[in-house]
């Protein structure tokens, strides 16, 4: 058995749905196994803090700037957030990670990303500049939004190689 396939098979949870197995095996066959994040491995700070500081957005933008975002990225992120409002799309899977099967978060940009009016939140998010994507994810983790915080964390971890537990203290 090739190394990629054996690695992929180790990541399949018990009673995994066939869709997950198919995704894992198709990725393993071409040398890029799907990444599955076991919920037990996730930090425990995903719940919104009981109190979010009034200046949470400034703090989030400052953190995103530490990761390379600039003023143009912040402006693009603001515009994207307005689009999310217009299309009532905050709860959609625009970061590309979802727990649709209930077995842990997986790289899944094909489902749960299209708003009722047909607007594809994932496609619009992917079209944003690198820094603007980072701003959106950091804001989702640090702020008071309806974005999927675990999906944002998975995006930061796997797409930006950045992890941290959000703590305002």
Image: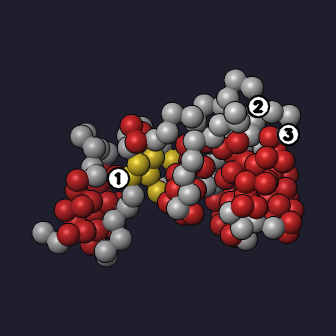
Q: Quadrant of residue 17?
A: top left
Classify mark 1: helix, strand or loop. helix
Question: Contact (CB < 8 A) between labels 2 and 1?
Answer: no
The residue tagged with tag 3: helix, strand or loop?
loop
Determine if residue 131 is in view.
no
Q: Is residue 58 left or right of residue 159?
A: right
| Disc on the earlier residue, 3 or 1 | 1
Separation of marks 3 and 1 at Cα, in angstroms: 42 Å
**Outermost residue to the bottom:** 30
Q: Badge 2 is on which residue?
A: 52
Residue placed under numbered mark 1 in the picture: 19
Which part of the image, by quadrant, shows the C terminus? top right
Give the residue pinned by disc 3: 55
Let me know if residue 75 appears in the view: yes
- Number of numbered discs overlaid on the protein picture: 3
Left or right of 32: which side holds 66? Answer: right
Q: Residues within 10 Å of mark 3 (few under 14, many from 20)?
A: few
Q: Residue at 54%, 52% (x, y): give it.
A: 163
């Amino acid at each position: 058995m090739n190394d990629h396939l054996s690695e992929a098979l180790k990541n399949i949870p018990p009673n995994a749905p066939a869709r997950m197995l198919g995704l894992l095996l198709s990725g393993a066959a071409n040398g890029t196994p799907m990444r599955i994040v076991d919920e037990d491995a996730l930090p425990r700070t995903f719940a919104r803090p009981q109190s979010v500081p009034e200046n949470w957005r400034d703090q989030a933008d400052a953190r995103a700037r530490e990761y390379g975002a600039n003023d143009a990225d912040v402006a693009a992120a603001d515009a994207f957030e307005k689009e999310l409002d217009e299309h009532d799309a905050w709860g959609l899977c625009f970061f590309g990670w979802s727990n649709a099967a209930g077995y842990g978060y997986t790289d899944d940009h094909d489902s749960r990303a299209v708003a009722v009016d047909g607007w594809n939140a994932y496609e619009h998010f992917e079209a944003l500049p690198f820094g603007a994507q980072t701003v959106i994810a950091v804001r989702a983790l640090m702020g008071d939004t309806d974005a999927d915080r675990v999906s944002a964390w998975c995006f930061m971890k796997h797409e930006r190689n950045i992890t941290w537990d959000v703590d305002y203290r």
